[in-house]
Amino acid sequence: MPNKLARVLGCLVLAVALPAYAHHGVAAVGMGGPEGPGAALETTSAMPLPQSTAFAMLKSEYVSFQQMAHAKPANKDFSAFNMLALGFGIRSWLSAYVFQPFNSKSQDSVGTNTHLGDTNLMAVLGLKWDEGLRLVPEKESLDELMDWHFSVYLSCTLPVGPTERKDRNGIPYAPDMQTGFGLPAPGVGIAVLKQLSDDFTWLAEANYQQFFPHTYSWTRYQFGGETRLNTALTWRLVARGPLRTDLAAELLGLHLQRDKERNDAGDLEPLQASGGAIIYAGLGVRLYYGSWSLALGAKRALPIRAMLNEGSDQQGSEGLENIRASATLGFSTRL
């Protein structure tokens, strides 16, 4: 193989796992290298890990919330979502990932809850279109990397995070302030990628995650299911040997079903001031050097508060952040 292609398929190929957070953790994955398709910051890439490639990743996301004078019981101040991820290319068309969150959620007059989140397991099947739909082969030339690529992925969280943590007053945190969700939460998604030219790559994905009712010591609660529709365009600015710099612009759509809580009759009742739709605009930069990558990005919800159900009462919810800023450090190697 030419040296250029060897860099793509060898240990210089970088794998980056990108958790995209609402108040639940949902993992997205992407990869890129000195040559070939780019990877966005939050939109899942359809490119699987090369066979026998392992990676490790650390990501931290800081979320600052808008403050409201009438917030009840108190304003949520910030959340910090941190993630350790490990992945492995089992075959050229099959990758496996494990994500372990460690999160902090802070609310005025109540305190800050910091603990493990729910572990997320994910399997990704990679496909491409080459005179028909087929599994991603072990070796692809630079021209073949220009083909349409697709992936289908399944995920499920494990109830590792606690659900009964108490605040500084000895009262249990509300369900959305806990770092765990009590029961497994399965998810499914599809992704598509097309390298438009040597420097531009288009990505899109759709996914859904379902949550089930969990009985707390003081209530029974079900978080609303989450649907995401994301798209991104990446632009390769610099590509010199093992060095590459990309810009990524993204539009991220999120629809949340209403949360439900047990009422006086013992039934789960949809809650006011929960659920709705949000559209985020995001911008980021990713630096690659050898087997390392560093990504910095930020996103903000478009000011369409009417898309949220009773949005004026949803302080501390998705769509009402000041900003969501993130940093990701990744490393990969061919075993």
Image (cartoon, rainbow, N blue to C red):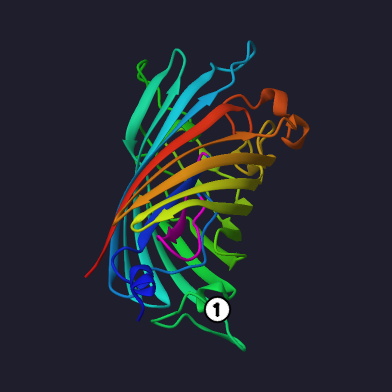
- Residue 320 sits in which quadrant? top right
Q: Is residue 329 above or below residue 63?
A: below
Q: Residue 137, position in %: x, y?
A: 43, 83
The residue singled out by tag 1 in the image is: 128
Task: Report the residue at 33% width, 50% height from top.
Answer: 330
Q: Is residue 266 above or below residue 80?
A: below
Q: Is residue 212 magenta?
A: no
Q: Is residue 82 above or below residue 208?
A: above
The amino acid beneath tag 1 is Lys
Task: Report the residue at 33% width, 75% height from top.
Answer: 51
Helix, strand or loop under label 1: strand
Q: Is residue 29 above or below residue 114?
A: below
In the image, 308 versus 85, the foreground residue is 85
Q: Residues within 10 Å of mark 1 (few under 14, many from 20)?
A: many
Q: Residue 14, position in %: x, y?
A: 36, 59
Q: Residue 153, position in %: x, y?
A: 50, 67
Q: Residue 174, position in %: x, y?
A: 48, 29
Q: Is residue 35 magenta?
A: yes
Confirm whether residue 100 shows in the render: yes
Q: Which residues are magenta?
A: 23-40
Confirm whether residue 166 shows in the render: no
